Image (tube, grey):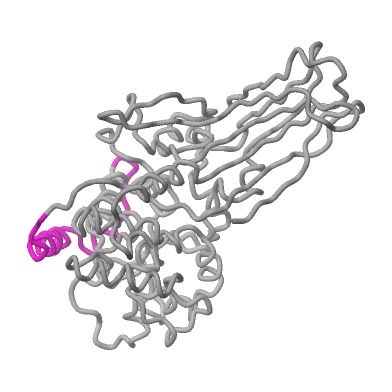
Amino acid sequence: MKKIMLPLVLLAGGITLLYLYADSDQPVESGQGVEVQTDQSRIDQNQADQADEISAQTLADNRSEAENSSFVEAYWTYTVATKGEAPHEWSALEKSLKPEACAQCHVEQFDAWKKSLHAHAYSPGLIGQFPGMGHVQGNDDCLKCHAPLREQKYSSRQDMLKSLSAKLKHPEGFSQSGQLGKSHLPLRHAGVTCAACHVRGWQRFGPPQRDTGSIGKIEGEAHSGFTGIKDFERSSFCASCHQFPQSYAINGKPLENTVKEWQQSHFAREGVQCQGCHMPDRKHEFKGIHDKAMTLKGLNISLDRTTTGASLTIESTWVGHAFPTYVTPKVVIAATALDENGQPLQNWQWQIIREVYVDGEWKERRDTRLMPGESRSYEASDVPEGTKQIHYQVKIIPDHFYKGVYEGLLGDHLEADARA
């Protein structure tokens, strides 16, 4: 667990630095349920039939704004990378969906992606839940975002159990060095891979060509070039995973409501897309609240004296959705009055959180998050006599909710590999 600390204190002479505690565990999705028995071959055939409905030409077409949502929906509904036969003249490298294959040419993108949470989306905590819920529900409810391609799905319960066992022996789901010969793990272990976003029906897709802005089919020596599509630079492209449906709503708001929060913000009105902050200059780092610099960039934090103590103000200046979005993180603001010897005299504490719980059904206890442009002050007032210093601490716990989920799961009767 990595912890980063800088002090933030209100001294007699003024303000010094921010005290930010960044707890950077890798996040994973949570899920609960019972095993559902379904004919996997029927599922595969249905997906294959649906995949026929989205053709290369359909993907290549340039659409009007009104049609963008239908393109993105089709792209993420039929996530089949190897539909049909690969061109016979292609090399084995061109046919490979492994991120290590992409790394042979796209070194910069691979080096950024391999450090990202996308690359670690197929995490032990996620798949440890699957023996209890069943591989079909794991496919449908979890892997659709954590390992999106049809080629990454489980074919059977035994396939799922073998995958869990392999994950325990090989925690990294791909070769960090990008060497193809060293990676023998299933594609699903690499999480949200290059192919998950860029390959459908053997063809490569991406944003408009960087130097020319060209869209449509762009010829190239490797894998017959690629198709440039403007939707890759729009927030709607991220919505398949980062915007839950209304059927997942608690107190009227889906558990993850990120894209709608963005749509209601001035960022959407000004044309600032998700990619502008999370993929600046097309970098594949996908940074968010786990990254200290990214978090600080989005907030303006200031301290002021008051007649009865001190006040810390947090303003969400460059966060294009709620801070924090989703139910997972918790932000704790703590203030302590100290005497001349640095001994505590009084404590104050506040939280920025969307807190949900289960009581027969999902319920929301409170929602104290900051919306884009919103500011809020946290005042330490009526300080005790003898106070010489007031110390503020802003503590970010990105995976607060998941930790509670896993503590609960470990209290259940889990199979050995799942418990591990």
Q: Between residues 165 and 369, which one lies in front from this camera angle? A: 165
Q: Looking at the rendering, in which quadrant would you find the N terminus?
A: bottom right
Residue at image coords 55%, 60%: 283
Residue 276 falls left or right of residue 395: left
Q: Could you tell me residue 146's position as x and y percent? A: 35, 57
Q: Is residue 163 above or below residue 393?
A: below
Q: Is residue 205 above or below residue 225?
A: above
Residue at image coords 23%, 46%: 33
In the rendered structure, does residue 60 fall within the stretch colored magenta? yes
Span of residues in magenta: 37-66
Residue 28 falls left or right of residue 19: left
Residue at image coords 46%, 52%: 27
Q: Could you tell me residue 291's position as x and y percent? A: 60, 51
The quarter of the displayed image where residue 256 is located: top left
Q: Is residue 182 visible?
A: yes
Q: Looking at the rendering, in which quadrant would you find the C terminus?
A: bottom left
